[in-house]
Amino acid sequence: MSTDRRSFLKLGLAAPVGMKLAMAAADAHAATLLPDQQSTASNGIRKVPYKRIATEEAWAPQEMFDEYRRLLKSGAKLDPGFVASWDTLTKGPDNILVQRLLDIGERRLREMDASGIDVQVMSLTSPGVQVFDAATANSIAALSNDKLAEAIRRHPTRFTGLAAVAPQDPKTAAKEMERGIKKLGLKGVIINSHTQGEYLDDPKFWEILEAAEALNAPIYIHPQSPSPDMLQPYLRRGLERAILGFAAEVSLHVVALMKSGAFDRFPKLKIVIGHGGEGIPYMLYRIDYMYVHGKGMQPGKTLKRPSDYMRQNIYITTSGLPWAPAITMAQSVLGMDRVLYAMDYPYQYVPEEVTMTDDFPISDEDKKKLFQTNAETVFGL
Ligand code: MN
């Protein structure tokens, strides 16, 4: 990193607008580097008066990748978004990204130390078990939860995690959620957005929402590539993943949940979304306005406005967005208690981004909320 950029990273919001844009471009560049080009070295991570709890940190068991390989080689008709994400698994030895996902032991701990992360909240990487038939999905979800719980038992002060479930089979998903939380000590649920083109606003999935509310278990809706019906224009341009498609996919999912009345039916349901809220906080005034006045909407159908659900049911994390203008904006719109720190290891493992977040122009008390106490509250750590 150049000295210029480093000095402006230190300045944060104080940098002039032009330089901030340059920083943003540099950050975008850093995020697109192949994982083995990203820094893994300690780069002067400082001691801070709070724990850094990272809340959207991915992992995967070998068995899931074996099933992905089997699917990809099967000749079956597959979601092209899934194929584009994981076909590298069939093309040679595991790359460093796959190696990092598989490690829930020493390597991960070393890289947490090198980046100043005290605790990782781990979740099954996207799209998890949601591409499988129901039987395979149930079995890989249970196996994943057992393995994750075992890693957490080995390193209870460093690791915690979310249960994987198979929305393809809502009844079993609700049971596995309960097992994961009550028996295995997991702290919530990961759902990697659409399940074979279907979203949680469909009442056929509401058994899952009901169980999550009853268990006080937050559901982290993590992105995957847009569902098949909206995928093609993104895929043709190579924009289906984190650069653009992910935010389109999850923002659709969350606003669809609002519109469905799910939060009226399950008023204590907690949903967590990453990446600064996938654009929703920035757009919230207009989403509210059009929710009431827009064509195709049904005024009065739900009890509250999107901004109410955002402040009562939704938490957002900073995953992949260690950028003060976006995150302080979201904090001002949603409140300091609704924004949690996340790194997005190993997809955006850039240790200097931790320091960028330490340097946000907010009070020490609010930094402690961002990095530590909000995660403790939401996930019951
Ligand atoms: Mn992620």
Image (cartoon, grey):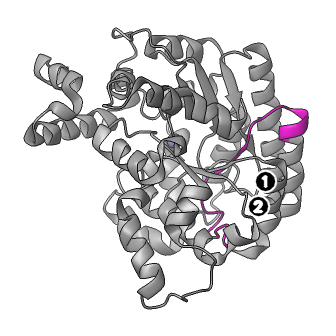
> Which mark identifies residue 22?
none
Give, as a three-letter code, the residue at label 1.
Ala
Answer left or right for 23 relative to 92: left
Secondary structure of residue under mark 1 = helix
Quadrant in the picture for residue 38: top left
Residue, disc 2? 209
> Which mark identifies residue 212?
1
Which residue corresponds to the image point at 48% horizontal and 90% vertical from the top-left?
Answer: 296
Tag 2–tag 1 contact (CB < 8 Å): yes
- Marks 2 and 1 sit apart, C-alpha to C-alpha, by 5 Å
Number of other residues with Cα within 10 Å of mark 1, as a class: few under 14, some 14 to 19, many 20 or more: many
Give, as a three-letter code, the residue at label 2.
Leu
Task: Evaluate whether residue 74 shows in this view.
Answer: yes
Q: Position of residue 74 (x, y in %)?
A: 66, 55
Dominant SS type (magenta) = loop
Which residue corresponds to the image point at 19% horizontal and 40% vertical from the top-left?
Answer: 25
333 up-or-down from 149: above or below: below
In this rendered view, identify the residue nearer to me: 318 or 104: 318
Which residue corresponds to the image point at 70% horizontal and 27% vertical from the top-left?
Answer: 160
The boundaries of the magenta stretch are: 180-201
Q: Quadrant of the N terminus?
A: top left
Disc 1: residue Cβ within 8 A of ligand 1's nearest atom: no
Task: Evaluate whether residue 57 shows in this view.
Answer: no
Which residue corresponds to the image point at 41% horizontal and 70% vertical from the top-left?
Answer: 232
